[in-house]
Amino acid sequence: MNDRGQLYTIEGLAAAILMVVTAYIILNSTTLFTPGETHVIDLQLQQLGNDALAMMGTPDSYLTTKSNLTLYIENSTGSGNIDFSTNFSRYINGKTDGSDDNLQYSATIYYNSETTGIKNITFVSSRNMTGREHAETVSRLVPVSTVSNPPLNLTDLTPGQHFVLMEVTLWRA
């Protein structure tokens, strides 16, 4: 007998142990997020908000001239805020498996007053932010008519057609 067979056996065992230890370390290590992966969640939240505002800002049929979003703002003295809140929450929180997500939002309307400049009005908020949440903001220009009864106490707008900016801040609770 010679010693070459024993040397190959020891080398094989050492290689096997090295491979098992390496596999164990790789499988039990923590996952590191690269900066590109963390922005995917932000983009998804932003896209979800944009899609919800686009659905609400598009008229239901070609015979309708006003979208639901316009009607919510123009009729906000009564149930406009509740209707907006119900539909917007349904759009952003609905999942394909039938369960609901836990996204919160706060909608603000900005408009240009001819006497005092840019003004804002809080339209509706599902819950107040604590300041620890990471929020994304989406916005959409909405045409409104201020003929005789101005919506949302926009009393400093002249009668006629105006555009207001609806800005919605979304966050995961």
Image (cartoon, helix red, strand yellow):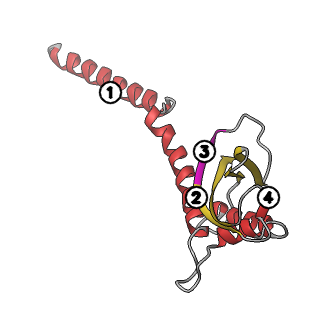
- Residue picked out by circle 2: 141
Per the image, label 1 sits on a secondary structure element best described as: helix
Q: Which residue is mark 4?
A: 155
Camera-near label (2 vs 4) is: 4
Residue 124, how many percent across, how many down? 77, 56
Identify which amino acid the numbered label 4 is placed on: Thr
Q: CA distance from mark 1 to mark 4?
A: 80 Å
Residue 137 appears in view: yes
State the quadrant of the N terminus: top left
Q: Which mark is residue 16?
A: 1
Decide which of tag 1 and tag 4 comes sooner along the chain: 1
Q: Position of residue 148 (x, y in %)?
A: 78, 71
Neighbourhood count class around disc 2 (C-alpha, 10 Å): few under 14, some 14–19, many 20 upward: some
Measuring 50% from the left and 31% from the top, which residue is drawn there?
28
The mark that comes first in sequence, 2 or 4, is 2
- Asked whether 144 or 6 is in front, the reply is 144
In the image, taking residue 14 as reference, residue 2 lies left or right, namely left
- Residue identifier under label 3: 136
